[in-house]
Image (tube, coloured by chain):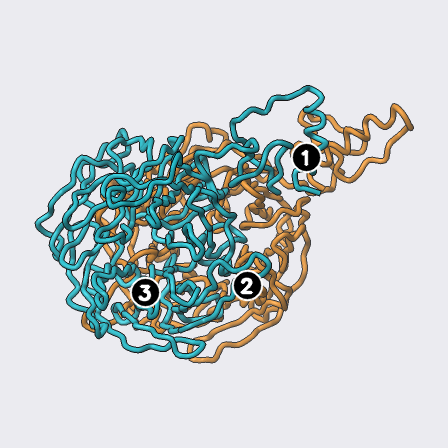
Chain colours: A orange, B cyan
């Protein structure tokens, strides 16, 4: 039952005593904007609930949101929830972050002040956002050329973001361009705009973009992974320079994006595309890169020296659209260099859209957070997975208290808490909600 | 029970207050119901006996500017074929029948397809009572190929059953990704079909296929191909075909940049020549191009001219003094007699009227049809057509977060009226909203 319906139910229940004595209240009887609730209930995130009930927190109400544009990052004392607003929408093109406290408090939204412009008629920009050890953020944005631009080459911009301290969000965030100008990347034509991805490791920060072009010598339409090296401590913007370029996507569609970066000691696995994915391992030692084709819709989970673990989601049915039903279990696979693809374990049904979140934890089992097989699942499952064997243990389920379709989801752990964030949509409306639970096995 | 009866309880209450609903049109309910004394015509309730001056056939998410096709109706009037590739749950190619009096049928689904990606389509009329529909589509998540599928679709099928759709010819090429398939071009003399499409692998090449009937299916009689010039990118190889002689075609190729090439009677493609402006039409020895001039950022308009050029796009003879709102895509002109119809044209940035221009190698640009839009909604695209002494005009415009498809019929004027076309008495220009889409976002292939 939604909170609104619950409020109606409570109103009816509060009137009922006038006629028939003490009412029986439901589990979530009403909103409590003034903080007061009937006996036995506590005001939790503005809803009267039983003291042990997890009540989802509303982070933002938006007119529209692409699921891939919802991001969750950990902070030392909480979380950051980020999303994109669009050039054609009422707020215009931009990027917004809100702080989500360990206690479930939600800060004022902070626009990142990048002034990145986008064509209202073109496909929405893609972005990536990472948090650095010093608390600042790096934002990368790619997009089609602007309408008055005669060039066809897509644009790539990067920014360093400084957030105000907690409690001072109203001051807004400061954005500094990393580069003196937007980078322009080669393209094979209309729609060939890659999503960018950062890889942050002890070796440094890299930003990758999959460019496309015609190789006149080879008479081929090709893709190349362009990697920029970024100094997060830069004093002033520098000219954008591609540090290295790697051939990629041989025999596969080329006009795709960088889906994920999995840095390890000695190199990075770049996961390219989400529909027909491949994993391109680029070694820090300048060895020849190695590309492996993954199963359709596979999702890179984690990597270690010499191996990549990925999830093969449940099979799409019907028209095989991202929103269509899925069937069957998901599988956890491992690819080790020089060895065939191995199925570690079959697990519960897992949709590819919204995709699951995988969280690696030192000395603790990894966590997989997913709504499972249903796009309108009313619960989000938390699973503990031994990444060596794929053995899966159900930890808990979080009630969404809604049956609206899920557009996107994410999760992060911080200071003994697990934040699960999702975007649920209906016609003309998207609500970003969150639940905060204890981090499984953390002992906090 | 008539559909309007469903509203009786509501209107019965109103009737107690003796409401005067007036002559001003108002929207029908979703089922097309109207109060007594009113009839739902093209999504609005009109007082019985009234004739709506403008017709909005329906509200939609998006119709690409290149995917509106007029042709003469089988039984008089005209047919408009549109491809809605963006409305959730309603992706498909639709037929709207328009009478000479301006009555517009409800959109009829000719060919539905899945929701993930739009398909590109080009529609022509065949002599056998079918539309020839050249389509290009991306694969589903399990597939690997871009598929060119030429369909035969029954025209104006009886209302009691769905139109018969048959696959006439299919080719595939490896899928390379992207947002939408490139536009596919088609032309027909009624008996055969020429199709132009771009294959993006190996640096990209454009192919022209000449298809002829061969029993139930059609066969490839001959073909030609050319590698793309470096300026035309493999995923930007939009194709459009113009017939310049009974056995000659001209190919327009490109999206950000444009090239043209002649195609001879053997389907051989001549040299691809880059042209500096947007070619809107090809005559046998000249091009009609759209040339952009100064941009007014405050008014969000550009000065434009329409030029007759040589086949290199050079030596323009300008019809100047026109304007286009930002975002308007005329996309192409439509053949008529010895010339071509261009829509929309205007010298007023507000486009209070939807004017159709006529240009031939010998006739300067002249307005031949003019519709009072009754709206200042910003325009996206338009297409004009003249048949049996009537001018048919379709256009798309934005209203809030929606796109509307409007249709109007009027008497042609100027050089087309002077050619002896019999004027139909009394007809006021009669635009109707034909389609209207709710849209949280507006995708497009805008190049400007």
Q: Is residue A244 visible?
A: no
- Quarter of the image with the N terminus of chain B is top right
Q: Position of residue A20 (x, y in %)?
A: 91, 28
Camera-side residue: A131 or B344?
B344
Badge 2: chain ID = A
Instruction: Name the mark nearer the viewer: 3 or 2.
Output: 3
Per the rendering, the mark at residue A319 is: 2
**What x and y, as percent, mark residue A286?**
28, 69
Q: Is residue A310 above or below residue A444?
A: below
Query: SS at mark 3?
Result: strand
Q: Nearer the viewer, mark 2 or mark 1?
A: 1
Taking the view exactly as shown, the residue that stands out farthest to the right is A20
Residue for point 26% across, 68% down: B206
Q: Evaluate whether label 1 is on the same chain as label 3.
A: yes
Q: Are marks 2 and 1 on the same chain?
A: no
Q: Which residue is mark 3?
A: B188
The structure residue drawn at horizontal position 20% and vertical position 56%, both measured from the top left corner, is B282
Residues under labels 3 and 2: Cα distance?
Answer: 33 Å
Quadrant of the rendering where the C terminus of chain B is positioned? top left
Q: Position of residue A11 (x, y in %)?
A: 77, 28
Q: Identify the subunit bearing mark 1.
A: B
Q: CA distance from mark 2 to mark 1?
A: 37 Å
Classed neighbour count for the residue bearing mark 2: other residues with Cα under 10 Å, few (<14), some (14–19), many (≥20)? some
Label for residue B7?
1
Report whether residue B206 is seen.
yes
């Amino acid at each position: 039952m939604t909170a609104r319906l619950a409020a109606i139910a409570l109103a009816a229940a509060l009137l009922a005593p006038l006629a028939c004595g003490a009412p029986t209240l439901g589990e979530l009887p009403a909103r409590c904007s003034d903080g007061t609730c009937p006996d036995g209930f506590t005001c939790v995130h503005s809803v009267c609930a039983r003291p042990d009930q997890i009540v989802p927190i509303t982070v933002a109400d938006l007119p529209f949101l692409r699921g891939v544009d919802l991001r969750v990052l950990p902070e030392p004392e909480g979380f950051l929830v980020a999303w994109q607003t669009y050039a054609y929408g009422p707020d215009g093109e931009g990027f917004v972050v809100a702080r989500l406290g360990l206690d479930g408090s939600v800060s004022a939204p902070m626009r990142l002040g990048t002034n990145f412009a986008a064509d209202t008629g073109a496909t929405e920009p893609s972005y990536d956002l990472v948090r650095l050890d010093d608390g600042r953020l790096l934002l990368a944005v790619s997009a089609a050329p602007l309408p008055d631009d005669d060039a066809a080459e897509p644009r790539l911009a990067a920014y360093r973001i400084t957030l105000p301290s907690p409690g001072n969000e109203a001051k807004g965030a400061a954005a500094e361009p990393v580069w003196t100008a937007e980078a322009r990347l080669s393209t094979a034509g209309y729609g060939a705009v890659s999503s960018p991805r950062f890889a942050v490791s002890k070796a440094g920060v890299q930003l990758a973009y999959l460019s496309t072009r015609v190789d006149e010598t080879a008479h081929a339409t090709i893709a190349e992974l362009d990697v920029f090296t970024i100094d997060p401590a830069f004093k002033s913007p520098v000219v954008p320079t591609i540090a290295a370029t790697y051939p990629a996507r041989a025999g596969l569609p080329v006009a795709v994006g960088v889906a994920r970066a999995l840095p390890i000691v000695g190199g990075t696995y770049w996961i390219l595309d989400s529909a027909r994915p491949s994993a391109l391992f680029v070694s820090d030692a300048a060895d020849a890169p190695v590309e492996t084709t993954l199963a359709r819709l596979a999702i890179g989970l984690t990597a270690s020296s010499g191996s990549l673990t990925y999830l093969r989601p449940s099979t799409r049915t019907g028209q095989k659209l991202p929103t269509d039903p899925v069937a069957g279990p998901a599988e956890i696979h491992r690819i080790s260099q020089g060895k065939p693809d191995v199925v570690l374990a079959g697990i519960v049904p897992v949709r590819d859209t919204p995709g699951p979140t995988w969280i690696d934890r030192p000395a603790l089992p990894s966590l997989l957070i997913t709504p499972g097989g249903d796009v309108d699942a009313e619960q989000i499952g938390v699973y503990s997975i031994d990444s060596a064997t794929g053995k899966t243990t159900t930890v808990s389920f979080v009630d969404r208290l809604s049956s609206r379709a899920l557009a996107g989801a994410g999760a992060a752990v911080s200071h003994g808490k697990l934040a699960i964030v999702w975007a649920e949509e209906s016609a003309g409306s998207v609500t970003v909600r969150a639940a905060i639970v204890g981090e499984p096995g953390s002992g906090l | 029970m008539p559909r309007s009866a469903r509203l009786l309880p509501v209107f019965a209450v109103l009737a107690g207050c003796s409401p005067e609903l007036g002559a001003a049109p108002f929207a029908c309910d979703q089922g097309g119901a109207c109060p007594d004394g009113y009839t739902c015509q093209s999504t609005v309730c009109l007082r019985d006996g009234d004739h709506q001056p403008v017709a909005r056939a329906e509200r939609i998410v998006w119709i690409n500017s290149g995917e509106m096709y007029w042709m003469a109706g089988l039984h008089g009037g005209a047919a408009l074929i549109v491809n809605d590739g963006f409305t959730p749950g309603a992706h498909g190619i639709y037929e709207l029948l328009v009478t000479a009096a301006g009555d517009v049928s409800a959109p009829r689904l000719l060919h539905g397809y899945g929701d993930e990606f739009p398909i590109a389509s080009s529609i022509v009329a065949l002599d056998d009572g079918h539309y020839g529909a050249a389509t290009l589509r991306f694969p589903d998540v399990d597939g690997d190929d871009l598929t060119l599928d030429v369909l035969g679709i029954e025209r104006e099928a009886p209302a009691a059953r769905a139109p018969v759709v048959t696959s006439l010819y299919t080719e595939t090429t490896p899928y390379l990704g992207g947002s939408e398939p490139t536009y596919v071009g088609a032309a027909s003399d009624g008996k055969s079909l020429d199709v132009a499409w771009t294959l993006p692998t190996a640096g990209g090449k454009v192919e022209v296929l000449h298809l002829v009937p061969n029993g139930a299916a059609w066969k490839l009689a001959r073909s030609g191909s050319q590698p793309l010039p470096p300026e035309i990118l493999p995923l930007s190889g939009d194709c459009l075909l113009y017939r310049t002689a009974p056995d000659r075609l001209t190919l327009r190729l490109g999206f950000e940049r444009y090239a043209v090439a002649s195609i001879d009677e053997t389907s051989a493609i001549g040299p691809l020549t880059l042209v500096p402006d947007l070619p809107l039409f090809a005559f046998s020895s000249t091009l009609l191009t759209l040339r952009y001039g100064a941009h007014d950022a405050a008014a969000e308009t550009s000065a434009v001219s329409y030029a007759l050029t040589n086949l290199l796009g050079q030596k323009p003879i300008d019809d100047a003094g026109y304007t286009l709102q930002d975002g308007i895509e005329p996309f192409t002109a439509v053949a008529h007699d010895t010339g071509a119809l261009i829509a929309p044209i205007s010298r007023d940035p507000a486009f209070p009227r939807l004017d159709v221009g006529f240009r031939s190698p010998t006739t300067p640009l002249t307005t031949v049809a003019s519709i009072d839009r009754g709206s200042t909604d910003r325009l996206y695209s338009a297409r004009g057509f003249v048949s049996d002494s009537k001018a048919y005009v379709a256009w798309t415009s934005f209203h809030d977060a929606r796109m509307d498809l409007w249709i109007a019929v009027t008497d042609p004027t100027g050089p087309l009226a002077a050619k002896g076309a019999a004027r139909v008495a009394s007809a006021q220009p009669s635009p109707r909203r034909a389609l209207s889409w709710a849209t949280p976002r507006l995708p497009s292939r805008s190049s400007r």
